[in-house]
Amino acid sequence: MDEPIVVAEGLRKRFGATEALRGLDLAVPAGTVCGVLGPNGAGKTTLIRILATLVDPDAGRARIAGHDVVRDADRVRARIGLAGQYAAVDEKLTGRGNLRMFGRLYHLPRREAHRRADELLERYGLAEAADRQVSGYSGGMRRRLDLITCLLLRPAVLFLDEPTTGLDPRSRGEIWDSIRELVAEGTTVLLTTQYLDEADQLADDIAVVDHGRVIATGTPDALKARLGDRLDVVLQDPAQLGRAASVLAGLTGGEPSVGSEGARLGVSLAGGTVRLADVVRELDRAGIAAADVSLRRPTLDEVFLSLTGRPTGAAADEPAPVKEAVR
Ligand SMILES: Nc1ncnc2c1ncn2[C@@H]1O[C@H](COP(=O)(O)OP(=O)(O)OP(=O)(O)O)[C@@H](O)[C@H]1O
Ligand SMILES: [Mg+2]
């Protein structure tokens, strides 16, 4: 079998007293999208910087297309593109001007640089804005321009560090479309994100990173299946929450949590099953009126919460919340 195009083994990196990576392993098969998901400070950017040869690991190894990121850094650089956490484009130039400039920086022949710039602007929906100064671009347009400058050299592997953070939903959707287009052409993408829906939408495989290590990997579906289905019950009378919780605990063996709306209880079935009819009957027997009883797959947010003890968007060193909030 072919070696995965991105391989990281036991990566460690320390910055002063901070251990950013503590033995991180990762493998990304060619032609797939790997979503690296983790809270602030988990080590996502450090991982990307090591894979992109911008910083050396203290220990461990990484290879891109078989080339070691430290010993064969030049060979690695020839095969990758990197769009950092903050868009790196020249505000004073036009979109086309930026692409041409980067084309020259990358030593593309002038003609080829111009041709490639035009092609990319057209393909990724920036043709109309191509001759406007970037200072007038929206956040989403800047990100898209940043992304396509990485494509000038047709990289085999593209690293995207939080490609849509801070963008409005429409711009996020446009970036997602661009990423899907790239993948359809065979590019391997490793993206970091704090947005579970982004990983859910784009990633073939997800690696959940916390405190510098990968704590879970799998397809979005596999990660959800691991947590088991969720049973949601909405009560007519919030005053009956306590009693309803003990009925549900008895039926499922799990510990129900109270939703933010007050009259909703949720409990994970943790691999087991329960029949809705039994839930309704037992609640009825206890004199509890339910407005709604339903079974559903967990959201990736719930998976993340159960793995890390923290909701997404919380900092890595934030204490775990006392009570799990349902939705
Ligand atoms: N150059 C540096 N000097 C000192 N500390 C650093 C440096 N780079 C990263 N760190 C620390 O290492 C840890 C991991 O940082 P990293 O930027 O990799 O996290 P991240 O997962 O990308 O977080 P975010 O979601 O905020 O981008 C953090 O505690 C960070 O403060
Ligand atoms: Mg980061």
Image (spheres, rainbow, N blue to C red):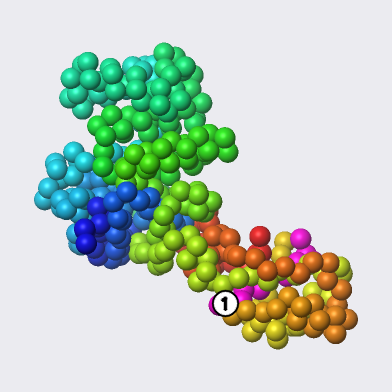
Q: Secondary structure at mark 1?
A: loop
**Horizontal side of residue 43 vs 199, given as left or right:** left
Question: Residue placed at 52% from the left, 69% from the top?
Answer: 225
Q: Which residues are magenta?
A: 261-271
Residue 288's x, y, as percent? 85, 77
Decide whether residue 202 is among the magenta residues.
no
Q: Picture coordinates of residue 224 (x, y %)?
A: 52, 65
Residue 145 position, x and y percent, is 40, 28
Q: Nearer the viewer, residue 152 or 53?
A: 152
* Residue 262 lies within the magenta run: yes
The correct choice, above or below, for 62 with respect to 159 in the image is: below
Tag 1: amino acid: Ala
Q: Is residue 119 above or below residue 220?
A: above
The residue furthest left is 71
* Side of 191 where 104 appears, left or right: left
**Which quarter of the figure is the N terminus placed in?**
bottom left
Residue 217, by quadrant, is bottom left
Q: Which residue is mark 1?
A: 270
Residue 42 seen in the figure: no
Q: Residue at x 62, y 79 (%)?
A: 273
Residue sticking out furthest to the top: 131
Question: In the rendering, at what x and y percent does residue 94 appear?
Answer: 39, 16
